[in-house]
Amino acid sequence: MAHDREWSGPDLVGRTMELGQIGDTMQSGLIHTAVTLVVSGDAGVGKTALVNQACVNVDSTALILTGGCLPLASVSFPFLPLRTAVNGAPPLEGIPKPVFGTSGQASDDSMVAIDNWLTEISRARPVVLVIDDLHWADSSTLDALMYLIAGPGDRPLCILATLRNGEVGEGHPLQRWLADIRRMPRVFWLELGPLDYRATGAQLAQVLGTEPHQSLIGDVFSHTAGNPYLNRLIVSGLRADTRHLPARLPADLRTAVLRSWHSLTAEARELTELMAVGGRPLRAAALDELVQQSAFRCDALAILREAAAAGIAECDADGALWWFHHPLIAEVLEQRLDEQKRRRWHAVFAAHEERRLGEGATAHFESLAALAHHHDAAGNFAEAYRWTLRAATATNGASGTGEMLLLLRRALELHDILGYETEEREGLLNRMRAAAADAGAMEDELEAVEALISEINAVDRPLEASELMVREAQLRFSTGREFLSISRMRRAVQLASANRQSWQYALALSELAVAELWVEKPDGQVHASEALRAARRAGNPRALTYACYANAMASLNSGNLTRGREAAALGVEAAKRTRDFWALFGAIMWQANLTESFASQTYADFMRAGRGIMASMGSPHVYIATLAGFEAGSYLAIGRWKDCAVALRVALGSDPGAMGDVLARLTAAQLAVRQGKQSEAEAHLARAEEISAQASKFMNNKFDDIRAEVYLAAGNPEAAYTTIMRYAKAELPAEYMTEASVPLAARSLADRIQRARDEGNPTADLLALIDDLLELFPRVLQDEFDTELFKTQMQALNGLFRAEVGRARSSSENGRQWVAAADECRDATLRWEEAYCCWRAVEALLLHANTQRGPATEILHRGLELAEELQARPIQASLKQIAAQARIAILRPAPGATAAGVVELPGLTEREREILGHVVSGLTYAEIARNLVISEKTVSTHVSNMLRKTATANRLDLSRLASRQRDEPTARPGQP
C-alpha cells in the first residue's frame, strides 16, 4: 500500500505525542517482539483516525490488515472484523487464507487457522492487524484476539484495537476480556483524551480554511469539550468569518450529528432513518425493496450517494454494502425516532424478512435472529417469541451456543411478558441449561439450574430436585463461589433416597463421597463404595462414571492405588459413552493423580492426552482449558517453563471459565514471580482472587503457597509466613496445605531471622517460631503415594526444609545441607528448587565464617547455568552479586579449551595470556600459583598489569572481556 508521510485530516491536529506513541509501539512490534496496543477514548475523540494515520506512517514493508466491528444488536457475525481483514489481504503465494464457516458460523479451528496464517505471512513481511470498534466485537472475535495476543512473541506482529469508553456496562463479557488482557505481557494501552483549547482552535482552522475568531473557538470548546468529531460537526456549514455559534446551539452529540443530517433532502433523511433501524450494512437493492414496503418512494441508490456526499453514509470497498460514515450516526438516528415511528420501521424490516423467507430465501441463523429482533422492537411479542425460538434452534457450531443462550434468555423474558404456561417456562430453562452446558457457560448454566430448583416441587419430584442440587454444587464449585458443600450433597442424597434404585441416588452418593474425601471424612470411603453398588444396580453409565472417580479418589486415601487407577480408567470410558464432560474431566484428573507425581512429565502427558480426548469429542473449552492449566503447572514444577507457557496459552487463549482461569492465573503468577516479573505475578494473583470467592478454601489450587512466594519476592516474609500458617493449627491442617507449604514457612522465618541478624536485632522469638514449626511439622506434608519419583521428591523437599532450618539457626553444616538439598532436587527433577538451593549453598559456603571457595565456585556455576536455563532472574542476580563480592569469575572456559591461551587480547605477554586463561576458569590466585609453580604475589602482579593494559576495573570485568573476545566469530572473507 502507498505510504504518505504527510499528516492529513482535522482530527489529527494536536495529536503529535499520541501519534508518536502509537508509532513507537508499532515499530517495536514489527522489529523486536509482538505487541498489542489498545487505543481507548470517548466516542468521537479520534481513535480511528489516529490509528489509520499511524498505519500510513509505518514502515512501507509492513502489511496493514484492517477490520471493523459493527453494532449488530441481537445478531452477531462470528469473526466479522477478522473476516474483513483476511479478505482484504493480498494473496501471498503458497500461503492460503484461513477458511471461515458458512452462514456466519465459525468453524471450531478458526482461531488456530487465523493464528497460523498470521504467523506464516509475518515471515514474509511485518504485519499490523487493526481491529476498529472493539466494543462491538462478537465473542468469537474476542476469543480469537485473546489467542493471538497470547501467541508467540517472536513474530513481527502488531495488533492495534480501538475501544470506545463506556460502551458496555458491568457484567458484559468484554469487561472480563479487558480485565484479562490488561494482565498479559506485551499489551499496552493508550487513553486518548479530548483536544485542549489550543488544539481545538487549530482543528477549526483546518475545517474552516482560515484562522477562526477566538470567540468561536470559545463557543465550540465550551460545548464540545474538545471532542474532535463534535468540533467538526458543530461548525460544519458555518462561514469562515463566523464569530459565534448560532443561537440554537447543539447541546450534545445527538444534536451535532443531526445538524449535518438535517442538510439532507427529506427523502434522504427518511431513508437513512430506515437504514439506521436495520442495524447492519445493507445493499442498495435491499433498501429499494424496503422503500417499496414503506409509505414513501425514492431512488435508494441516488439518495445513498447524496448521503455519502454529505459525509453521512459510505459504501464498502466492494461497492456493495452501505452503512454510516460513523456508527454514532446510526445510533443517534434510531434514538431520535419517536416510539411509533421506530416500531413502524422495525415492522417494515420484519415484514421484509418474512417475505424473503416466504419466497424461499435460506433461513440462516442471522436472518432468523434479525427477524426476531425486529418483531421484538416493533412490539410484536408473540411473533418475536416464535422467531426467537426458531432462531435459537437454528444455531449451530462453536459460536452458535453463545447466540442460543442470548436468544433463550430473551425468550424467557418474552414468555413472562406474554404470560404463557409454567410448563413451557420449565422447558425453556431446560433448553437454556443444556445450551449452557454445551457451551461451557457455567455461569449461565448455574442460573438456569437455580431457576429450575425454584420451579420444581422437591416433595413431588425428589429425584429431579436431587440431580439439580448435585449440579448446582458442581457449578458453584467450578465458578469459584463455594468449595464442594457436604451439606448440599447430604440434602441431595436425602431427596434421592425416595428411590434407592435410581441413578440419581447413586449420583448424589458419589458427589457426597467426593465432598467428604476432600476433607478426609471417614464416611467418604463408605459412601464411595455404596455409590458404586448403587450405580451398578441402576445400570446407568452416567452414575457409574461419577461412582468410579469417587472410588478412585477414595483409593488414594486408603493407599490402594492400583484399585484406584482401575476405577479411574473405567470412569473415563463410561464418561466417553455418556459424553458427560464434567465426569470425564474428573476421571481424567484422578487417573493422572493416581499414576504419578504432579511434578512429572508423566502427569503433564496425562493432561495433554486428556485435553486431546476432550477436544476430539467436542468438549467445551472450559474443561480443555482447565486440563491445560494443570498441564502448565506440571511443566512449571519440573522446570520446563517454555512448555508451561505454551500450555498457558491454550488455557487462556479463549474463555477458560472460572475454574480454568483461576488455575492458569495461579500458574502464570508462579512462573512470573520465579522469573522476576513481580508486577505481572501480582496482577495474575489478583485476578485469580477476584474470580474465586473463597480462594484459600479451594483445596485443588495452591493459592496460599503462590501468594507466599509473591510476598517473599516482594521482601515481605512476615506476610508470607502468616499466609502459609493460616491453617497450621487448625484441626485438619493438611486440608489446606501442600508439600511445599512447610518449606515455604521455614524459608519465611529464615528470611526474617537473617534480616534481624543483619540489622542487629534480637532473634530469640523468631528462633522459637522455628522450634514451633518443627514441633508441628517434623517433616513436609505428603499424601500416601507409592511411586519412586514422588518419594524422591518428598526426600528433596524434606532436605530443603532441613536446610532452611539450618539457615535460620546458622548451622555450621548449612553449606553441606544446601549442597545435599540441591543434589536431591536435581534427582527429583525439581529444577526451580535446585536453583534456589544452589543460591543458598553459595551463600552458606562463601559469606559465612567457614569459607569453602572451591565447592562454592562449582555450585555457583551450576546455579548460574540453571538460573539462565530457567530465566530465574532473581536467583541469577543474587548469584552474580555474590560472585562479584567474592571475586569469583562467573564465566567458565569454553568446552574443550585449555586454560593457557584462551584468548589473544592485544598487548599481553605469553605468561599473562596463560594466567588469564586460569582467571577465566574461576581459579583463585593460590590455585593459579600452584598450577604454574609461581608465587601468589607474581600472579597478583600479572593480573594488575592486565587490568592496566585492558582498562578493566577488576578480575570479573577482565574475565568478561576475555570471554567476549573469545566468543566473537572470526571475520569472514570480505569483512573487515
Image (cartoon, rainbow, N blue to C red):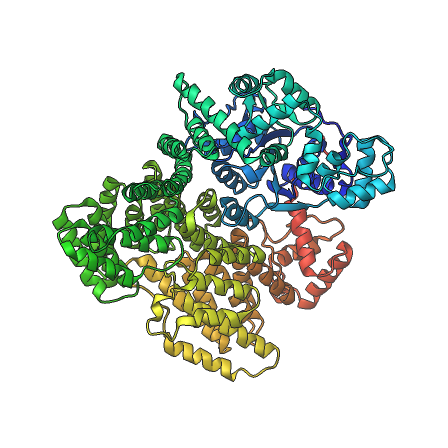
- Can residue 842 be seen from the camera position used here? yes
Residue 496 falls left or right of residue 83: left
Residue 572 falls left or right of residue 220: left
Q: Quadrant of residue 239?
A: top right
Question: Along the line of sight, which residue is nearer the eye, 40 or 606?
Answer: 40
Residue 744 falls left or right of residue 894: left
Residue 679 in the image: state x and y as whole percent.
58, 57
Quadrant of the image for the C terminus?
top right
Q: Residue at x 51, y 39 (%)?
A: 142
Image label count? 0
Question: Along the line of sight, which residue is nearer the eye, 43 or 620?
Answer: 43
- Can residue 565 be seen from the camera position used here? no
Residue 753 in the image: state x and y as whole percent.
53, 77
Residue 527 in the image: state x and y as whole percent.
19, 60
Question: Along the line of sight, which residue is nearer the eye, 6 or 381?
Answer: 381
Q: Quadrant of residue 737?
A: bottom left
Whether 114 is drawn above or below 198: the answer is above
Whether 960 is drawn above or below 764: the answer is above
Q: Residue at x 46, y 82 (%)?
A: 768
Quadrant of the image for the N terminus?
top right
Q: Residue at x 69, y 52 (%)?
A: 961
Residue 207 in the image: state x and y as whole percent.
79, 32
Question: Along the line of sight, which residue is nearer the eye, 581 or 221?
Answer: 221
